[in-house]
Amino acid sequence: MPSRRHSKPGPSHFHGSGQYVRQIIKCLEKVNARSGYHAYQIFDDWSQLVEACLEALPAHLTALAQTGQLAEDTAETKQLFARIRSRYDQQSAAEIWSAFGQALAILLESAEPGLWGPGSYGNFDVGYMGPDVIGHTYLLYASPNQARAQIFTPWNIALMMGQFLVPHGERQIHDRVKQACQHPDNILAQATLLAGLTVDNPAEAREWFFNRVLPAAMLTYDPIRVGDPAGCGSGVLLLAVAACFPEWAVRLNCVAFEGSDIDPQCVRLAKINCMLYGLNGYTLRLTEALQNVSDQVPPRSPGQAYRQAVSLAKETQLVASSATSLTFADLFRQQPAEVEG
């Protein structure tokens, strides 16, 4: 059985968020033991499944809340699942798929702290790679280029760089909103902003800004663009810069994040990280998926959104309160999918 190269990580690798990395690696090593495939192949399969599941999650949330069942996969997703399933021995398929599903659940749990506020990853000393759990897993478990020094920026360094680049993130956002309100074609924003000058109460002024001024300004708002074109890796620098802007601004897509890399695997990891932490409008997609069936607080993470959908399904008696089948593992489709011709 092909063996993977052990990177012999030091204790610091499993501090903070590294505990999730350790758990995910244990799950993937189960797949390695059952299949005999190299770690890179296993990680590549798993990361493709994770990306597909996160892309489909908004549709699954709507269907789950309305019907108690996950949405039907697209033809492309069915083909991906069938292709990856065919790579593994069918006698071990259930165990392998369960390990993949457990690793997904751990990854989603790792994103729960978010990037903002007390107890979040938006601080120093929260783990070697901080919120970049999937990138850290890749480096320790599957990176094929260790001999060529393929490494990702540690979180403490990335966050320090982000704070240098964006020392006044909230002021930058408010300046952009102000510009949008002053646009000659946005009369509604100008009128709404002027009307808000009569509001003296700070709490009411904040509510007026978010519920009236900001929606009107978005008609002519030009997002701040953050790019990492010289090799984004797993997107850790994008996450660090995101942590330097207000949470509401990132989640409302007031900041756009872009990156490129010569390694397709790195591009996939960066895309996954952007979805895990609500960048580039992903939080809006999750909120929109639930807004027609729920008046709950908008979800702050994919895991929270999934739990809200399951809770709604149970409240409407679409699924039994003791149901155990509605787990993240189900997103990997335990049964082989039929490929549309």
Image (cartoon, helix red, strand yellow):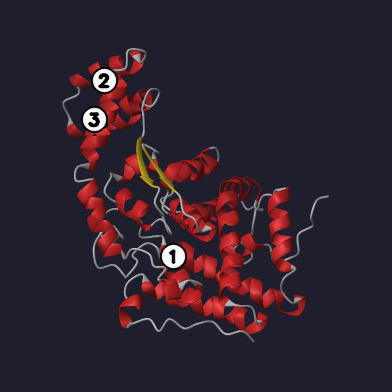
Residue 322 makes an appearance in the image: no
Which is nearer the N-term, disc 2 or disc 1? 1
Q: Amino acid at mark 2?
A: Leu
Q: Of tags 2 and 1, which is closer to the observer?
A: 1
Q: Residue at x 37, y 58 (%)?
A: 236
Which is nearer the N-term, disc 3 or disc 2? 3
Q: Quadrant of residue 29?
A: bottom right
The reply to whether discs 3 and 2 touch (Cβ–Cβ < 8 Å) is: no
Q: Amino acid at mark 1?
A: Gly
Q: Residue furthest right?
A: 341
- What is the CA distance from the residue labelled 2 to the residue labelled 1? 43 Å
Residue 335 makes an appearance in the image: yes
* Of the pair 10 and 131, the residue shown nearer to us: 10
The residue tagged 1 is: 135
Q: Eyeballing the image, is 97 above or below 79?
A: below
In the rendered structure, find residue 193 and report the number of the disc placed on it: 2
- What is the CA distance from the residue labelled 3 to the residue labelled 2? 14 Å
Q: Quadrant of residue 332?
A: bottom right
Q: Residue furthest bottom?
A: 1
**Residue 38 as seen in the image, left or right of residue 85:** left
In the rendered structure, find residue 175 and report the number of the disc placed on it: 3
How crowded is the residue under tag 3: few (<14 C-alpha within 10 Å), some, or many (20+)?
A: few
* Of the pair 49 and 161, the residue shown nearer to us: 161
Q: Position of residue 317 (x, y in %)?
A: 62, 53
**Residue 62 as seen in the image, left or right of residue 170:** right
